[in-house]
Amino acid sequence: MLVVKNLVKRFNSTLAVDNLSFSVDPGKIFGLLGPNGAGKTTTLRTILNIIKPSSGEIIFNQKPITYDYYNLIGYLPEERGLYKRSKVIDVLKYFAALKNVNKKDAVQLADIWLKKLNILNYREKKIDQLSKGNQQKVQLIAAIIHNPLLLILDEPFTGFDPINQQEVKNLILSFLSEGKTIILSTHQMDLAEKLCEEILLINDGKEVCAGKLSNIKKRFSGNNIRLGFKENGISLKEFPEIVKFDTYSNYTDIQLRDDIIPSHFLKKLIEKIEVHHFSVIEPTLNRIFIDLIKDDIHK
């Protein structure tokens, strides 16, 4: 549905997007990932022509993207932009009108979405009377009220509590079941891992890693285990079989040397420490993200 070729964006002497190329398949969730300041938002804004690219080509449905296509796209910006002294229903009618939705349909659609997101009782409230989370729900409705084919979500989970995160996640998956195409831009790797089939990881405006998430995980699979154990004075640093480890409150993720067989390592472990959990795992997207960005910084 969307093809970006050799995209470059300069702000005076700053190169914000450095020759990025990627394609987004229809009916999929594409993850545009990276740390803060990586160039994700700038990339999205050039696609949407909010800012002009310095060079490059953007193709939508096999044709150069023009204003004719923007009514087919919904955009949730990272920096929310609502008229805080206006009523919720009036804000939604206004954003719908910008996408050529007539007033009658806009009111009906607004009420449907307000009810679906459990904020219909705020319909006549002013935006600044809503909590931050509910304001973000209104912003999300503004992005989808015209039933877009392509939905671009820039940090859609920011500021939501776990319950509302789950609600938004389910909403995104419902769009997917309807055949919509979604670009999800985030630095929350746990959510990206659950939602995205294909990703592009960028840093300093450049591609660091790209492809199907399943293939990327295979590429970086390594020899990883998850360990739960009782502290008894033995440090994991004493085991030469371990390349590196990350300790959390209830478990530790460990990368073993490639030549180490996990079951053999377990036998050695239980001779020295009390193990209450041991499993072979694949690397998380968060771990891959951290390792790749660290490597990129040290190049």
Image (spheres, helix red, strand yellow):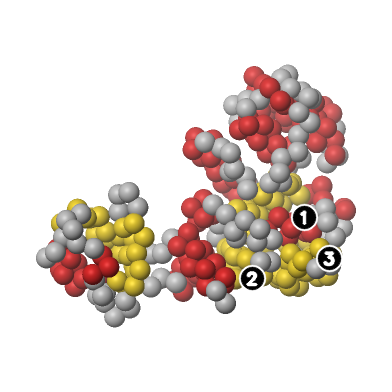
Q: Earlier in the sequence, mark 3 or mark 1?
A: 3
Q: Earlier in the sequence, mark 3 or mark 2?
A: 3
Q: Closest to the observer: 46 or 63? A: 46
Q: Closest to the observer: 197 or 250? A: 250
Instruction: Say above or below: 180 vs 214.
Output: above
Expressed as whole percent of the image width and height from the top left, the position of residue 187 reads 57, 54
Q: Residue 11 sits in which quadrant?
A: bottom right
Query: Mark 1: which amino acid?
Result: Arg
Instruction: Say above or below: 175 vs 189.
Output: above
Expressed as whole percent of the image width and height from the top left, the position of residue 268 reads 16, 70
Q: Is residue 211 left or right of residue 285?
A: right
Residue hosting label 3: 12
Residue hosting label 2: 207
Q: Is residue 247 left or right of residue 34?
A: left
Residue hosting label 1: 45
**Residue drawn at point x = 34 percent, y = 72 percent:** 243
- The reply to whether discs 3 and 2 touch (Cβ–Cβ < 8 Å) is no
Instruction: Say above or below: 148 vs 47.
Output: above
**Pointer 1 local density, CA inside 10 Å: few below 14, some 14–19, many at least 20:** some
Residue 180 in sight in this render: no
Query: Mark 2: which amino acid?
Result: Glu
**Pointer 3 local density, CA inside 10 Å: few below 14, some 14–19, many at least 20:** few
Q: Residue furthest bottom?
A: 259
Q: Tell which tag, 3 or 1, sits nearer the viewer.
A: 3
Expressed as whole percent of the image width and height from the top left, the position of residue 192 reads 54, 54
Counting the numbered discs, the total is: 3
